[in-house]
């Protein structure tokens, strides 16, 4: 019997109250009539199923009724419904969009089998926490370690693909045969590299990425076995990788075996660091164990090679954590901002529902009088807020879908994942859950309030009940909104300040009217320095002859596109090898004459590099101002000697510093070497490849002529990376601009919602105080006093909200100091602006209610009700 | 708040339980348990309404106006205070008739096709 009563609890309370007793009675008789153990068991089984089914059906009946009723009431107040849905859509939309990006970048496992076992290994030197491995150290680490189930090396490169339509420059990665097995990836077609492919002198093989296969080979299923030329060397296509495979970053479009030069100098070198290394932890080996083991291995190698491996230790990080601190911080800031927006949206929704609950007291009282229990009323109200929440959530998903492409620019390119997150099931579930929680969380309290005993006294007491307690609660909600919007406004403001600071940084070179493009000369075709020189002089002469062009020149790498190329420097006879610690390094570039004039880098002393600076002449160098400051402060640098890149060089000129590493980072001093002063086949990575053109003509008219010139100089030479210098500098701040726009949008939404909240609260307060205000006016209060009274109420709310807002905003600023590029988290101007905006918002939000109060007609106000 | 009742046809076809309950309360006022007894008796024990199905149907039929709770009680010695008695409303009778008509037509059509044994 008692068990049956428990089962009855599954029914809606209203149903149970009505019929529970009789149902128990019927069941008791059935139980009595049942005979035998089998009969009783059968009755029990049938009853359990029957109750489960009917209870669910009874709930469903009520839900259907409530939904019908909800549809009717919401259709009756479309303004309320629309406001609530929009407020929620903004809150849910902001969070869904933020979640989709954060989840994509920070939370979701990388798209590899057991991705949490994948690690990257780095050398750790003083001054560099993550240094690529030297080939010799890589081979030793691989053979000496026992923690890994496979270890592979790779480096990013790019190649000229010739023989498939126009010559093309393609981002690629050279990998050892171990890399793909370590990632546990299989090709979509064909096969992976084997040890036989990855050997010195092996015939060239390559794997295509799915997009490249589609774009260049038209998705041809017969592509396997096709011959292509990469940098003038024959290669055979052996496979196509899966569509969603990206490694090491999403830019890589094809892979070649590294064909490691095991017996060459490359292999013996312990100081030339260029290998990135990925490995898979053995089952049962923890990250800490692997770290400990690699620490031992590195220490052993340091003892063995005290000079080359001085202070060289190993660092092992999960592949998932290969993400800059800044990217991480940025996504946290984004999520924090989204949560602020949701908080404000929730406060607004709760306020709307409370106000509506008060306005509906009579209706609810009538329903209660007609026999609806409190449970039914609460249930009805919660259904209503859930319907609103889900409608808002659905609209919010659309908002998020629209916002994700913008946010996708915050996905760092360095991760092996696709460029853009998609709104998938995970994200939809997230949106559904926060919508549902919002609906229940912020519907329950107003529902309980509205249906409470005192509320239901409405029939007797008239519409003036509700009292101060509710208004106090609503005021707290508005204060929360103001607080959250101050935090968001200040955060957005600080980011704007940071952006301004960076944009105001002088890059040290000319950005306007400079077109750049890349012609990466393939090796070994251009191994000979003289052959390259022929190409450069021909191209430069023809380009400089074009109308509007004032000068043109070649450089190894443009500033801000290639940040590396850092070499140790030895001055005054100190040997190079012991100077690995980072304080004696410079960024090295080979240039053709005229580069400084073209880029507008001021030549402060001496001369430019010249055509007469050949291997037969004394080796010359032009150095930057900071180079001179470091080694010969206060002295004349001309004629001084230093050693870099295997040669002793004489300083012939001094130029201004440029920001090689970008606007936000400090750059090493710069050394420029004459492009002819390099032996054939040496330093091929530093061969000048970027053409820089200073011109009064726009790139649109200039570019076709330049392409023609390059085609006639070498018809197989592809042109890539066409950009203006202004684009390159702008790209430096692009992700920051996105950050500012995103956070700014969040702040604007928050600001708007808080304004709506203040407006709503005061409007409601005015309408409830109609009689009181009427009496005041009748007693001779001036319109100015009435306005002051209402605005003061708003100002108090804003003031109380601003105080904690300032404290929290300062804390938020401290937390994201890494994003501020030196702007202070307590920046006075930012805080003043944010507070000013809040004051403005309060005044605007209270103005309409205040004016409505002034227009109250005292006679009808006092007579009403 | 006068609502015009919907036409009886609007409820057709009736769920079997609803039709049987209408039949049960057609000849006299009955309480819940009596309804299940009556239905079981008339169907030769084939249809045993569970308590849940019964009261869910009753609740809906009350809302639809097919039956009404009656205030008349039987003789006190036969009455159990806790029980509620239900009676068919005129509208409920209309609906039951409409359902019977519908079923008759169905049977006639089936017979025309030879699906029902007996006289044509």
Image (cartoon, coloured by chain):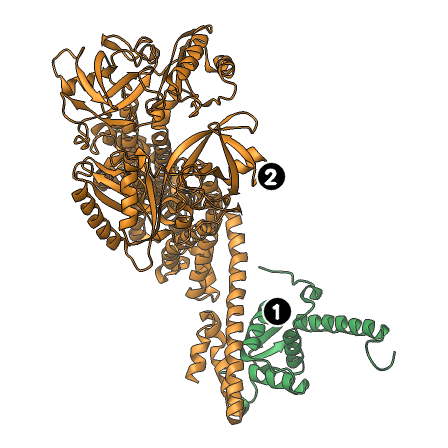
- Viewer-side residue, A300 vs A655: A300
Disc sitting over residue B65 in the figure: 1
Residue B52 image position (x, y, % from top left): 54, 76
Quarter occupied by residue B103: bottom right
Q: CA distance from mark 2 to mark 1?
A: 71 Å
Q: Is residue A685 above or below residue A253?
A: above
Q: Write down the residue under mark 2.
A: A220
Q: Is residue A371 above or below residue A473?
A: below
Chain letter for mark 1, please. Answer: B
- Viewer-side residue, A522 vs B30: A522
Q: Colour of chain A?
A: orange
In percent of the image, x 42 and y 50: which residue is there? A181
Pointer 2: residues within 10 angstroms few (<14), some, or many (20+)? few
Q: Nearer the viewer, mark 2 or mark 1?
A: 2
- Dot 1: element: loop
Residue that lies at the very extreme toward the right in this rendered image = B120
For the question of whether residue A346 can be seen, the reply is yes
Residue A671 image position (x, y, % from top left): 25, 19
Left or right of A80? Residue A274 is left
Q: Colour of chain B?
A: green
Residue that lies at the very extreme toward the left in this rendered image = A634
């Amino acid at each position: 019997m008692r068990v049956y009563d428990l089962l009855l609890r599954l029914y809606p309370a209203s149903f149970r109250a009505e019929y529970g007793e009789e149902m128990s009675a019927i069941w008791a008789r059935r139980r009595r009539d049942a005979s035998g153990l089998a009969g009783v068991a059968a009755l029990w089984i049938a009853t359990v199923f029957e109750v489960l089914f009917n209870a669910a059906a009874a709930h469903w009946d009520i839900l259907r009724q409530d939904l019908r009723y909800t549809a009717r009431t919401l259709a009756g107040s479309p303004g309320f419904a629309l406001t609530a849905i929009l407020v929620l859509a903004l809150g849910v939309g902001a969070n869904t969009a933020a979640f989709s990006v954060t989840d994509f970048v920070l939370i979701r496992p990388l798209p590899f089998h057991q991705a949490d076992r994948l690690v990257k290994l780095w050398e750790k030197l003083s001054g560099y926490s993550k240094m690529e491995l030297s080939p010799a150290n890589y081979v030793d680490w691989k053979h000496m370690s026992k923690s890994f189930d496979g270890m592979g090396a790779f480096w990013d490169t790019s190649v000229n693909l010739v023989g498939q339509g126009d010559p093309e420059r393609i981002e690629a990665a050279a990998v050892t045969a171990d890399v793909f097995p370590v990632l546990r990836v299989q090709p979509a077609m064909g096969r992976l590299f084997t040890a036989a492919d990855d050997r010195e002198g092996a015939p060239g093989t390559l794997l295509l990425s799915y997009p490249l296969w589609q774009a260049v080979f038209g998705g041809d299923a017969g592509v396997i076995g096709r011959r292509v030329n990469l940098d003038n060397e024959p290669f055979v296509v052996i496979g196509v990788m899966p569509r969603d495979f990206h490694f090491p970053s999403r830019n890589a479009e094809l892979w070649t075996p590294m064909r490691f030069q095991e017996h060459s100098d490359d292999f013996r070198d312990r100081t030339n660091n260029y290998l990135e290394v990925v490995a898979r932890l053995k089952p049962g080996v923890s990250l800490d164990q692997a770290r400990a083991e690699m620490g031992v291995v590195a220490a052993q190698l340091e003892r063995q090679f005290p000079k080359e491996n001085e202070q060289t230790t190993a660092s092992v990080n999960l592949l998932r954590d290969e993400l800059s601190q800044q990217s991480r911080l940025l996504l946290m800031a984004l999520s924090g901002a989204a949560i602020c927006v949701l908080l404000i949206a929730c406060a607004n929704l709760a306020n709307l529902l409370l106000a509506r609950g008060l306005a509906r007291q009579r209706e609810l009282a009538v329903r209660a009088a007609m026999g609806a229990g409190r449970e039914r009323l609460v249930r009805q109200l919660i259904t209503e807020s859930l319907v609103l929440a889900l409608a808002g959530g659905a609209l919010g998903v659309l908002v998020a879908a629209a916002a994700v492409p913008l946010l996708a620019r915050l996905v760092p390119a360095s991760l092996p994942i696709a460029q853009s997150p998609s709104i998938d099931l995970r994200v939809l579930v997230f949106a559904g859950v926060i919508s549902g929680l919002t609906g229940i969380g912020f519907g329950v309290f107003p529902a309980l309030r509205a249906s409470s005993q005192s509320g239901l006294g409405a029939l007797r007491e008239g519409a003036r009940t509700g009292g101060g307690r509710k208004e106090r609660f609503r005021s707290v909600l508005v204060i929360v909104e103001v607080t959250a919007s101050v935090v968001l406004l200040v955060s957005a403001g600080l980011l704007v300040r940071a952006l301004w600071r960076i944009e105001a940084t002088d890059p040290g070179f000319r950005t306007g009217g400079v077109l750049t493009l890349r012609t990466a000369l393939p090796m070994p075709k251009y191994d000979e320095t003289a052959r390259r020189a022929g190409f450069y002089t021909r191209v430069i002469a023809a380009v400089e002859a074009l109308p509007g062009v004032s000068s043109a020149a070649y450089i190894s790498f443009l500033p801000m596109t290639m940040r590396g190329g850092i070499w140790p420097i030895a001055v005054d006879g100190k040997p190079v090898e012991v100077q690995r610690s980072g304080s004696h390094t410079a960024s090295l570039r080979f240039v053709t004459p005229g580069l400084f004039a073209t880029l507008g880098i001021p030549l402060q002393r001496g001369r430019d590099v010249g055509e007469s600076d050949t291997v037969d002449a004394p080796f010359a160098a032009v150095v930057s101002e900071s180079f001179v400051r470091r080694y010969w402060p206060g002295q004349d640098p001309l004629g001084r000697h230093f050693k870099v890149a295997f040669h002793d060089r004489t300083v012939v000129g001094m130029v201004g510093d440029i920001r090689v590493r970008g606007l936000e980072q400090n750059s090493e001093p710069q050394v420029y070497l004459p492009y002819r002063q390099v032996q054939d086949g040496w330093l091929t990575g530093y061969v000048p490849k970027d053409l820089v053109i200073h011109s009064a003509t726009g790139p649109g008219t200039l570019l076709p002529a330049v392409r023609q010139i390059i085609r006639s100089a070498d018809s197989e030479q592809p042109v890539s990376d066409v950009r203006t210098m202004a684009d390159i500098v702008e790209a430096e701040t692009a992700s920051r601009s996105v950050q500012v726009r995103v956070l700014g949008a969040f702040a604007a939404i928050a600001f708007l919602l808080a304004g709506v909240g203040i407006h709503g609260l005061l409007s409601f307060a005015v309408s409830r105080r109609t009689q009181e205000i009427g009496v005041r006016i009748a007693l001779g209060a001036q319109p100015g006093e009435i306005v002051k009274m209402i605005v003061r109420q708003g100002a108090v709310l804003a003031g109380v909200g601003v105080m904690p807002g300032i404290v929290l905003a300062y804390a938020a600023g401290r937390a994201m100091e890494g994003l501020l590029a030196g702007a202070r988290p307590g920046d006075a101007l930012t805080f003043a602006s944010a507070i000013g905006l809040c004051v403005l918002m309060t005044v605007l939000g209270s103005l309409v209610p205040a004016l409505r109060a002034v227009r109250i007609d005292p006679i009808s106000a006092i007579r009403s009700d | 708040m006068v609502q015009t009742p919907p036409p009886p046809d609007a409820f057709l076809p009736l769920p079997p339980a609803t039709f049987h309950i209408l039949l049960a309360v057609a000849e006299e006022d009955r309480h819940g348990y009596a309804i299940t007894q009556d239905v079981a008796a008339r169907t030769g024990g084939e249809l045993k309404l569970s308590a849940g199905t019964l009261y869910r149907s009753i609740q809906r039929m009350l809302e639809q106006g097919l039956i009404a709770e009656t205030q008349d009680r039987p003789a006190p010695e036969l009455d159990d205070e806790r029980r509620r008695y239900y009676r068919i409303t005129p509208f409920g009778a209309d609906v039951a008739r409409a359902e019977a008509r519908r079923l008759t037509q169905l049977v006639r059509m089936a017979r025309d096709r030879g699906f029902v044994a007996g006289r044509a």
